[in-house]
Image: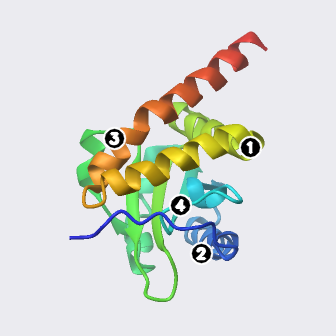
Amino acid sequence: MSIVSVVAYATEWPNEYRAIRDELAEVFAPDVVAIEHIGSTAVPGLAAKPVIDVLLGAQSLADIEAKITALGERGFVYVAKYEREIPMRRYFVKSSAASSRVHLHAVEAGKRLWNEHMSFRDALRNDPALRSRYQALKLRLAVEFLNDKAGYTAAKAPFIQSVITKVSDRADLA
């Protein structure tokens, strides 16, 4: 059984992301895709599980599905079972002894899932008080749900959704 481990921000995470970004760009070339570092490792100073979350935005899910084999050849394991929960995402995991685990969230660029991931990341990057509250929550939940990753993730969801809703409301007013 694996445990929930939230660690201090590591300065190597952006470099790990850049290597993943370059690898994904090679897989998808010559198609134009957007590739972004998301999740807590994308927020300087924020404690996180040592997992590099990457958001890949393509024109369509079919464009992503066409690359499942090529991604697999690079060590990205396609996890189809989560499509029942989030049908507009294709999810991949890559593990390596040499670097952090990678979670690849492949979606349609510019659609709801893309926008939510980006707005949450950007809100944390731009608001030190929000980042501090989220870190405190994550650290508390990591203790409370030490042996329950699904419980940890579910317990963070209301906070995340509240931030996304606030950002969306502000965008609607602009």
State the residue at coordinates (30%, 67%).
3
Q: Which mark is residue 23?
A: 2
Whether the residues at callouts 2 and 4 have beta carbons within 8 Å, the answer is no
Q: CA distance from mark 2 to mark 4?
A: 23 Å
Q: CA distance from mark 1 to mark 4?
A: 15 Å
> Is 71 or 173 nearer to us in this picture?
173
Q: Which mark is residue 128?
A: 1
Determine whether the residue tagged by mark 4 lies in a helix, strand or loop.
loop
Residue 71, percent from left and from top:
44, 71
Amino acid at pointer 1: Pro
Whether the residues at callouts 4 and 3 have beta carbons within 8 Å, the answer is no
Q: Return the residue at label 4.
A: 48
State the residue at coordinates (47%, 60%).
104
Mark 3 or mark 4, which is nearer the start of the sequence? 4
Amino acid at pointer 4: Ala
Determine whether the residue tagged by mark 2 lies in a helix, strand or loop.
helix
Whether the residues at callouts 1 and 2 have beta carbons within 8 Å, the answer is no
Amino acid at pointer 2: Glu
Report the number of discs.
4
Q: Circle 1: is it few (<14), some (14-19), or many (20+) Cα within 10 Å?
A: few
Q: Return the residue at label 3.
A: 154
